[in-house]
Image (cartoon, helix red, strand yellow):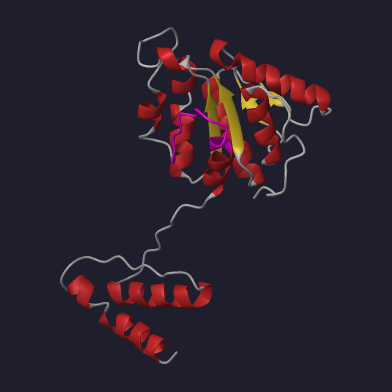
Amino acid sequence: MLNQAAHPLAGASMTGADMLVQVLADEGVDTIFGYSGGAILPIYDAVFRYNQEHQSAMPLIVPANEQGAGFMAAGYARASGRVGVALVTSGPGATNTVTPVRDSMADSVPIVVICGQVPTTAIGTDAFQEAPVPSIMGAVAKHVFLVTGGGAMHLNASLASEKRLTPVCNLHEQASAIAAENYSKATNNLGVCMVTTGPGSTNTVTGVAGVRRATLRR
């Protein structure tokens, strides 16, 4: 999490592109994988400026295409345990990352894909290299944001790092209930047991009764 104290650059005049790159730096991003295009060029310029001022602290790795950038970011995340970042342009640049985004979603791999976009007034007009990225990515990504202000980037990196709920399969419903109880005792988090109707739910009676007894004894 970011330090809530005043930022060293507070009050400084910065472009939106420079702000975005600074947020990535504040979030600990040390590598970007990207393929350039017209709509994303201002952010590429900001990356180059940042590296010029900070001894190449955030190198930009250029793949053969945007899909490669997405898979490279995912590979980086898998290998390092950190959030992988891909930087691509609007329209076909963004849609080329659908497969790595879906792959990362399926495997709980944390990546953030930053896409360029046409000017706000041109959204929805079939402008050059425009695509309905939120609609397309909404079906395959964990979260999709159309960024219109400066606060969303911190949120994106944090959400990408969050773990997905992982199902644990047991032999029968009673075992599931008891496993949920033991998980709750061990972690102080809520244990969740999912079963079917009828005998599936009645098979959890023993586990539920055990939890109730333990609660009443407290």
Residue 160 at x, y percent in the picture: 53, 43
Q: What secondary structure do most residues of the magenta stretch adopt? A: loop
Q: Is residue 10 left or right of residue 72?
A: right
| Vertical relation: 15 (above or below) 111 | above
Residue stretch in magenta:
142-153
- Residue at image point 35% right, 35% down: 139
Residue 112 at least partly seen: yes
Residue furthest out toward the front: 11
- Above/below status of 135 relative to 82: above
Q: From where the camera sits, is residue 110 visible?
A: no
Residue 59 in which image quadrant: top right
The answer to whether residue 34 is left or right of residue 218 is right
Residue 150 falls within the magenta-colored stretch = yes
Name the residue: 72% across, 44% down.
Answer: 6
Foreground pick, 218 / 149: 149
Q: Quadrant of residue 14?
A: top right
Quadrant location, the C terminus: bottom left
Residue at 21% in and 71% down: 200
Examine the structure image and report whether residue 143 is included in the region drawn in magenta.
yes
User: How many numbered tags mark residues here?
Assistant: 0
Question: Which residue is outermost to the left?
Answer: 198
Residue beneath the point at 45% across and 74% down:
184
**x then y, percent, for residue 73:** 59, 33
Q: Residue 31: x, y in percent? A: 69, 32
Q: Is residue 119 above or below residue 104?
A: above
